[in-house]
Amino acid sequence: MITLIQDCINNKSSRTPIWLMRQAGRYLPEFRSIREENQDFVKLCLNTKLSSEITIQPITRFDFDAAIVFSDILLVPYALGQHVNFKKDFGPDLDKIDLKMLNQVKKKDFLRKLNPVYETIKEVKTKLSVRNKDTIGFVGAPWTLLLYMLNRKSPKEGNFNIFPKDKDIHKILVKLDEFLKIHIEAQIENGASIIQIFDSWAGLLPEKDLEYFVYKPTKSLVDFIRQKKTISICFPRNINNYKKFVENVDPDIINIDYSVNPSVISETIDITVQGGLDPKILLQNKEFVRNEVTKYLKTFNKKRYIFNLGHGVLPDTNPDMVKYLVDVVRSFNG
Ligand code: CP3
C-alpha cells in the first residue's frame, strides 16, 4: 500500500502530509503520566509495551500521517557500551568513552541490547499499516553522535572544541558508520518505511569541516538506506547551505530549520522538502499560527512538501494548538 508521504515524493499527493518531530513527548498529558512513573528514560525507551503506546498516542489524538518511533539517538552510544543517563533539567549525561571497549563491541550484543526498539517498531507497524501510515525509524548522524560521545552532554555554543581529525576520531567515525548501518537495517527489517537522520549540531561546524564530518559520513548512510529501498530524510539543523548539503548527500527528503528563508529553499532545491516552522510559533495565538503556517503552505504550494516543524514540539505547547495546526494544514487548498 502506498502512503501519503510516498505519494508526495512521487508528486502525486492529494494533500500535504503532516507529522511533527517530538510529536510524542512532554506536551502530551498522556505521555507525562507514563513518564512520571518511569523515571529512567533509557529503560522507558527499551520497554516495548510503553514505547509503542507512546508512539501511537499522537496518532490517536491528531491522526498524523506518520508515526516516529519513541526512542532516542543516544541509545546507539548506550548499546556501544557508553552509559547514558537523562537527568531532569540537565539533559543527557554520558560516561567517558572507552575506545578499547568500543573496538570490541559485537554485532549480536548490540542487536540484543536494542532488540526492544525493533520489537516496538514491529508492533507500531502492525497497528499502523491498516491505517496506511508510515512508520519512521531514525538515527543520529555520525557528527552529532560523535559530539555527544566526546562532549558527554549537550554542546551549547562554546563549550566544546572542534576535534582534530586524529586517528581516534577517525576510528570512532568508522565504528559509528558500521553500527548505525546495523541499527538502520534492523529498523527497516522490522517495519520502518522511512529513516530520518538527525544532525542537530551540524550548524556548529565551519564550512571547511563539513565534508569530513557531515557530507561524507551522512552520504554513506543515505546510500545504504537507498540500497534497502527505503526513504531517507536528512535534518542537518542550522546548516548554512542546504542546497550544497543536498547536492553532496542526495537524500530523498530534506528537513529545514526555521533560520532559513523557505522561499529561497523552494526556488533552489528540487527534492521533497519537510518542515521549517519555528516550534515557538505554536505558543502564540491562533491567528498568528494560521498566518505563519499558511506562509509555508503557500511557499511550497504545487511543490513536494511535508508539513513539519523546524525542530521538535516544545514541552509548553498546548495540545489544542497542535490540533488547530493539523486542521489548518488539512483544510488548506491552494
Ligand atoms: O520525535 C519523536 O517524537 C521521537 C522520539 C525522539 C526523542 N528524541 C525522544 C525524546 C527522537 C527522534 C529524539 C531525537 C534526539 N534525541 C535528538 C535529535 C533531535 C533534536 O532534538 O535535536 C537529540 C539531540 C536527542 C538527545 C536528547 N534526548 C536530548 C538532548 C534530550 C534532553 C533534552 C530534551 O528535549 O528533553 C533528550 C530527551 C528526550 N528524547 C525526550 C524525548 C521525548 C524528553 C524526555 C523527558 O524528559 O521526558
Image (tube, rainbow, N blue to C red):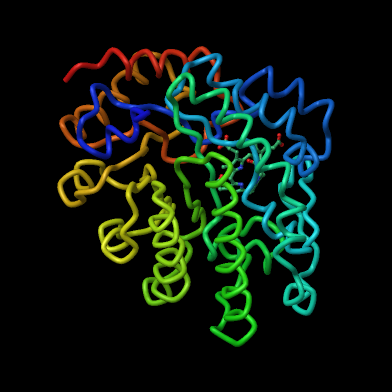
Q: Residue at x 32, y 35 (%)?
A: 6
Q: Quadrant of the C terminus?
A: top left
Residue 11 visible in the displayed image: yes
Q: Quadrant of the N terminus?
A: top left
- Quadrant in which residue 121 is drawn: top right
Q: Nearer the viewer, residue 37 or 12?
A: 12
Number of residue marks: 0
- Quadrant in which residue 238 is drawn: bottom left
Query: In the image, is 254 to the left or to the right of 332?
Result: right
The percent position of residue 260, horizontal first and vertical second, equals 31, 47
Q: Nearer the viewer, residue 106 or 24?
A: 106
Query: In the image, is 271 to the left or to the right of 26?
Result: left
Asked if 66 appears above or below 271 in the picture, the reply is above
Residue 203 visible in the displayed image: no
Q: Residue at x 66, y 35 (%)?
A: 120
Q: Residue at x 55, y 34 (%)?
A: 22
The percent position of residue 66, horizontal first and vertical second, equals 46, 29
Asked if 254 appears above or below 325 in the picture, the reply is below
Q: Residue at x 32, y 25 (%)?
A: 293
Q: Nearer the viewer, residue 271 or 85?
A: 271
Query: In the image, is 7 to the left or to the right of 155?
Result: left
- Ligand 1 rendered quadrant: top right
The percent position of residue 20, horizontal first and vertical second, equals 47, 31
Query: In the image, is 181 to the left or to the right of 254?
Result: right
The percent position of residue 42, horizontal first and vertical second, equals 77, 44
Asked if 158 appears above or below 196 in the picture, the reply is below
